[in-house]
Structure formats: C-alpha cells, structure tokens
Image: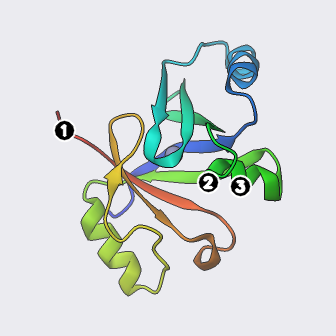
C-alpha cells in the first residue's frame, strides 16, 4: 500500500506576506491562487502553483505565533515539507508506531481545504514534516 502520494507543498516562513507575494510572483511568473488566514496558527498563508506541487508562504499575524517564533530563532526560510496522504489518521498511527514524534496526534483543519498534522523535526533530522489530506467537499 502506498503511504505518501507526493510532496504536496513546501512551506516558507516570511516576514512580510505582501512583499513575499510579489517576490514569488516575479520568481514563478504567476500570482498566488489563494490567500488565507489560519486563526488557530496565527498565520497568514498564500499559495502558488508550481506544476503539480505548491509553494506555501507563511507569515505570522502575531509575534508569539509559531511562525513568529520560528523566524525569531532561525530567520526566514524553508519551514516545512508537506506530504499528501490518502488517510491521515492511518498514516499518523503508522508513523507513531515507527517511532516518529507527533506534534498533532489528531489531524486539524489547515489552510487550502486540508486536514493537517505535523511531525516533530527532532524525529526527522531537523525537518518539520506536515501530512495533509484533501477534505472532500
Ligand atoms: Zn503547509
């Protein structure tokens, strides 16, 4: 059985979402197809399509939010890699059994119509991993 379908998106932490939007629009030649605030994460996100994958820009709406803290510690840059999965609960259970440290034991509603859950970078060579599953509407 297939566990991970593909890299769904790369998350990039930025200070200023508007400046980063115009920079990435120049870089990729397309505007973001979506901008969205995720209140629970104190974050504003925008998404760019790159072939079948996406770039997600993330800026903090509060200094003490997760992205604000990340940038204070590490500066702007790649924040996470997101993998697309068909069954997020099943994958979380599998990864926990394999010894990975889950940040979210149960998936939550994330940006871009997805259920998401994160795996702690301590257990993945320093890379924050997001699992995401499209919500069927
Ligand atoms: Zn993401």
Q: Residue furthest left?
A: 137
Q: How is the image coloured?
A: rainbow
Instruction: Provide the residue designation for mark 2.
Output: 66
C-alpha distance separating marks 1 and 2: 27 Å
Which percent across, then down, holds residue 86?
27, 54
Q: Residue 69 got which mark?
A: 3
Q: Earlier in the sequence, mark 1 or mark 2?
A: 2
Pair 1/3: label in front: 3
| Tag 2 secondary structure | helix
Q: Quadrant of the C terminus?
A: top left
- Is 87 or 5 nearer to us in this picture? 87
Which residue lies at the image location 80% right of the left edge and 59% below the top edge? 73
For marks 1 and 2, give the one nearer the viewer: 2
Depicted 25 relative to depicted 58: above or below: above
Residue 59 visible in rendering: yes
Residue at image location 33% in from the left, 54% down from the top = 108
Instruction: Give the position of the N terminus as an image quadrant.
Output: bottom left
Q: What residue is rendered at 69% in x and 19% in y?
A: 18
Q: Earlier in the sequence, mark 1 or mark 3?
A: 3
Name the disc covering residue 109, or none. Answer: none
Q: Residues within 10 Å of mark 3 (few under 14, many from 20)?
A: some
Label 1–label 3 contact, CB within 8 A: no
Q: Nearer the viewer, residue 59 or 120?
A: 59
Q: Pointer 1: what residue?
A: 136
The image position of residue 123, as x and y in percent, is 59, 79
Q: Are marks 1 and 2 in contact (CB under 8 Å)?
A: no
| Marks 2/3: CA–CA distance | 5 Å
Does any portion of residue 1 appear in the rendered image?
Answer: no
The front one of 84 and 100 is 100
């Amino acid at each position: 059985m297939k566990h991970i379908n593909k890299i769904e998106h790369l998350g990039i932490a930025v200070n200023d979402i508007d400046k980063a939007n115009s920079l990435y629009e120049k870089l990729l030649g397309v505007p973001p197809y979506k901008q969205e605030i995720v209140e629970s994460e104190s974050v504003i996100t925008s998404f760019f399509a790159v072939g079948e994958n996406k770039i997600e820009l993330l800026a903090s709406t509060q200094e003490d939010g997760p992205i604000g803290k990340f940038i204070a510690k590490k500066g702007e840059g790649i924040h996470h890699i997101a993998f697309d999965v068909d069954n997020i609960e099943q994958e979380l259970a599998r990864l926990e059994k394999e010894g990975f440290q889950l940040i979210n034991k149960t998936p939550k509603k994330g940006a871009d119509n997805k259920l998401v859950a994160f795996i702690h970078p301590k257990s993945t060579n320093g890379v924050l991993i997001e699992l995401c599953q499209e919500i069927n509407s």
